[in-house]
Amino acid sequence: MSADRSLSPDDADAFRRMQDDLIDSYDEELELELDDRDDRDLLFDEVPQGTDPRRDARRAYFRELFRLQGELVKLQDWVVHAKLKVVVIFEGRDAAGKGGVIKRITQRLNPRICRVAALPAPNDRERTQWYFQRYATHLPAAGEIVLFDRSWYNRAGVERVMGFCSDDEYEEFFRSVPEFERMLVRSGIVLLKYWFSITDEEQHARFLGRIRDPLKQWKLSPMDLESRRRWEAYTRAKEVMLERTHIPEAPWWVVQAVDKKRARLNCIAHLLDQVPYREIEHPEVKLPPREHDDDYQRRPTPAELIVKERY
């Protein structure tokens, strides 16, 4: 597929960005499929190095991603061993790539140890609660990592821009959140906050890609489309949020996210640097011999229970 030469420079750039997004979707499927080292080696050795720059870049990305995911497994083991409590907040505009990096972090980890909290809009009962109450129930116990795909910072972003909170509630949030986060840190929680930053042009291209891809249209809600219209209002809200909630105990870290793959690698590498860990030695795993009972006879599975083999 190639861009039409009659396209304007802006349209051609959007077309290129959409192509890159499509390739990234294919790569995501590859990441999920390549579960053993032999498969990964086949991917890396398929084409000699230096014959195709884009393929070389993808190869380098895969190599580093798998290396970092190996380090995440070591971090996971250390969190359990040291009984750490880790919270990582991911914020950013719609289509900034938060979900993509969260998926790569959790891809090889134990979901009982590393889990994702992605809360829907508050219900009528939750709206009457202390603002932080519904988030506090998702905080980790010892030996757990919780990744917040959006967080209590909804009040500083979408709620402010869309008028879902009053001015008084907005100001109370900024009075409360530094103390709330200091309290979390004092309680022993490791708190990391990431803002994924993309350009106006990149979000435009990603939204177009979602509109034109039936497999991704579900990612676009009416709220997302409205947020696109209010780009500048979100920018102002983000600037205020970073200024008023960047505290020594829980600073913000901004991830440059126009290039999705670089953003994932940079974020994961930075996360690993923030939590000192070491590799935990595990006892050698030995498969026990299977027991055999001479009196046991396996019963045939009734034919009507078997799924038809179409493939």
Image (tube, rainbow, N blue to C red):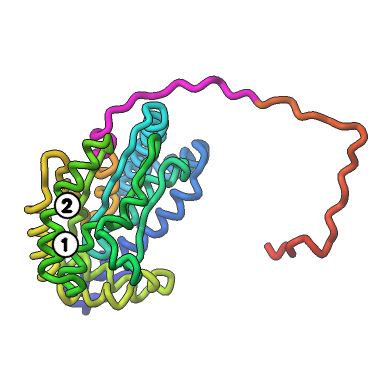
Q: Is residue 34 left or right of residue 139?
A: right
Q: Residues within 10 Å of mark 1 (few under 14, many from 20)?
A: many
Q: Residues within 10 Å of mark 2 (few under 14, many from 20)?
A: some
Residue 136's place in the image compared with 37, above or below, is below
Which residue is at a point 34% across and 24% down the rendered structure image?
A: 278
Q: Dot 2: what SS?
A: helix
| Quadrant where the N terminus is found in the figure | bottom left
What is the three-letter code of the residue carrying label 2?
Answer: Val
Residue 212's place in the image compared with 245, above or below, is below
The residue where tag 2 is placed is 177
Magenta region, main secondary structure? loop
What is the three-letter code of the residue carrying label 1?
Answer: Ala
Q: Residue furthest right?
A: 295
Q: Dot 1: what SS?
A: loop
Q: Residue 67 lies in what quarter of the image?
A: top left
* Between discs 1 and 2, the one toward the N terminus: 1
Q: Nearer the viewer, residue 132 or 239?
A: 132
Q: Nearer the viewer, residue 192 or 48?
A: 192
The residue where tag 1 is placed is 156
Residue 295's x, y, as percent?
92, 35
Q: Which residues are magenta?
A: 269-286
Q: CA distance from mark 1 to mark 2?
A: 10 Å
